[in-house]
């Protein structure tokens, strides 16, 4: 028997979950289990209580009210991958999700689980930063909304109180005809990326960039918005040589160093991947419906 | 502290009512309590794919689930793939004929994964097969014959309907 002893709870409603969270000491929420279960099996975590979210009603849905894509926390990554609404309203999410783990882990893994686990190079975390997502959290006191930019407070630590549950995330959609690309570098398909990048752009009729979002994952404890590059892109026509110059500043970003790669390697990737992604995003606009 | 729960679960078409410790993984439950040792455990932390089963028809790593979570659900393990004790499933035939296994340790996870994969994508390209089984490690075959077997199985399954009509074996 691998996991350590714990008490098991399988509430059916959000109200029951937050009630349990309000009174249990040392409780862990179990979503898709693709990170928590390995941690339990290896006894990296020793919770007294496991609160399983898999039977809670109303946490698994994909909706697109005006201008945003709203996804319930327990929506499986695989459902996002095959959702038509996601493909139409937020195509970059389809591209990113194909890089998340493998078929078997996407069948179980959830959006909320990934956002709360907050692995620095998790694709959905990078994407949430790129899209200026908001997360909704519930507790006994009610619900509140947190800008994703303020969600990571430290390495793998979200801005959640112990009695709070993430119930949904809202992703503002870019208008039809925008360019997008999610590009990452990993040693093996399905591994966490060493560095990943999510870019979105809009261009005017003459091909000049009017709006840009450029995000890097895997560089530090939280995704980094390359705001200097975003600003420099405005008014530019996307072209390889010019992108080389613009992206060079990213080499100065701070980067972590670990067994997978030294900081300098990540900094090199930080100059290369956004360039590739921006070219791909630009080609998509050229090949598709320019507004 | 060894809390237990009663669960009812259907595995390979048979319904079981069992009492399980809440911290037991689904993989250990299937192997030790149900005695279905075809589901293999390579890493027990979600990396190798040897423990893959179908949970309500979707592939999942059984080492990353708790047995209690299976209460009320439907599971297929490698033992449930063949139609009966004397006949292999076309996927299994393709693996036998194409030397798609050597030691066989990874095979249960690969077969269950491919059952789902070929159901979703009956006419895959080689590249799609390789991505489909990218969550399964094999230390023997170098994957080449697994890919060949999967493509062959896809062909057999596609022609299965026609064959059933002409050759009633
Ligand atoms: S034993 Fe489950 S993935 Fe390796
Ligand atoms: S056949 Fe030996 S591990 Fe795949």
Image (cartoon, rainbow, N blue to C red):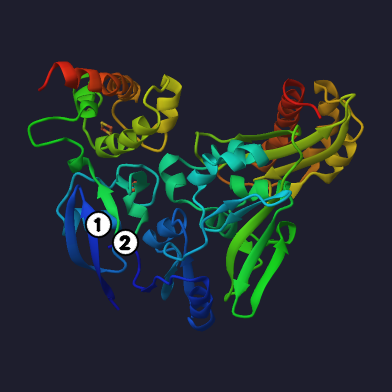
Residue B146 figure quarter: top left
Chain containing the residue with disc 1: B
A217 sits left or right of B69 in the view: right
A269 sits left or right of A82 in the view: right
Which residue is depicted at the point 47% across and 74% down? Answer: A27
| Residue that protrudes farthest toward the right in the picture | A235
Find disc 2 in the rendering and name its residue.
Answer: A2
Residue A117: percent from the left, percent from the top?
A: 56, 58
Residue B126: percent from the left, percent from the top?
A: 41, 20
Residue B2: percent from the left, percent from the top?
A: 27, 75
Q: Are marks 2 and 1 in contact (CB under 8 Å)?
A: yes
In this view, A148 is above or below A50: above
Q: Quadrant of the N terminus of chain B?
A: bottom left
Find disc 1 in the rendering and name its residue.
Answer: B28
Chain containing the residue with disc 2: A
Which residue is depicted at the point 40% across and 28% down? Answer: B121
| Residue that protrudes farthest toward the bottom in the picture | A23
Residue A153 figure quarter: bottom right
């Amino acid at each position: 028997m691998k996991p350590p002893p714990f008490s098991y709870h399988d509430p059916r409603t959000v109200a029951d979950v937050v009630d349990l969270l309000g009174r249990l000491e040392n409780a862990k929420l179990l979503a898709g289990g693709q990170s928590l279960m390995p941690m339990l099996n290896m006894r990296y975590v020793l919770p007294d209580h496991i609160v399983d979210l898999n039977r809670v009603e109303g946490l698994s849905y994909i909706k697109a009210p005006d201008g945003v894509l709203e996804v319930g926390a327990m929506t499986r990554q695989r459902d996002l991958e095959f959702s038509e609404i996601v493909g139409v309203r937020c195509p970059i999410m389809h591209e990113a999700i194909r890089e998340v783990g493998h078929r078997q882990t996407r069948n179980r893994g959830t959006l909320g689980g990934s956002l709360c686990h907050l692995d620095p190079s998790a694709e959905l975390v990078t994407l949430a930063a790129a899209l200026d997502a908001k997360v909704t959290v519930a507790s006994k006191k009610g619900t509140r909304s947190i800008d994703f930019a303020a969600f990571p407070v430290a390495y793998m630590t979200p801005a959640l109180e112990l009695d709070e549950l993430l119930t949904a995330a809202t992703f503002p959609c870019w208008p039809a005809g925008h360019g997008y690309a999610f590009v990452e570098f990993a040693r093996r398909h399905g591994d966490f990326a060493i560095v990943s990048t999510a870019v979105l752009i809009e261009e005017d009729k003459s091909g000049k960039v009017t709006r840009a979002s450029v995000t890097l994952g895997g560089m530090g404890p939280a995704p980094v918005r390359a705001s200097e590059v975003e600003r420099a892109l405005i008014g530019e026509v996307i072209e390889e040589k010019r992108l080389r110059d613009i992206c060079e500043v990213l080499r100065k970003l701070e980067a972590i160093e670990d067994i997978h790669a030294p900081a300098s390697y990540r900094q090199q990737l930080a100059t290369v991947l956004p360039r590739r992604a921006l070219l791909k995003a630009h080609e998509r606009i050229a090949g598709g419906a320019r507004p | 502290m060894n809390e237990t729960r009663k669960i009812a679960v259907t595995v390979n078409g048979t319904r079981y009512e069992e009492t399980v410790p809440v911290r037991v993984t689904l993989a250990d439950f299937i192997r030790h309590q149900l005695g279905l040792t075809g589901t293999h455990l390579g890493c027990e932390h979600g990396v190798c794919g040897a423990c893959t089963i179908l949970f309500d028809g979707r592939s999942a790593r059984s080492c990353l689930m708790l047995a209690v979570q299976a209460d009320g659900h439907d599971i297929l393990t490698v033992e449930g793939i063949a139609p009966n004790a004397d006949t292999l499933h076309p996927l299994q035939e393709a693996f036998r004929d194409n030397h798609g296994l050597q030691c066989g340790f990874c095979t249960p996870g690969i077969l269950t994964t491919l059952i789902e994969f070929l159901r979703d994508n009956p006419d895959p390209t080689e590249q799609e097969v390789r991505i489909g089984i990218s969550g399964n490690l094999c230390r023997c075959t170098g994957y080449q014959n697994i890919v060949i077997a999967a493509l062959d199985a896809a062909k057999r399954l596609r022609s299965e309907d026609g064959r059933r009509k002409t050759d009633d074996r």
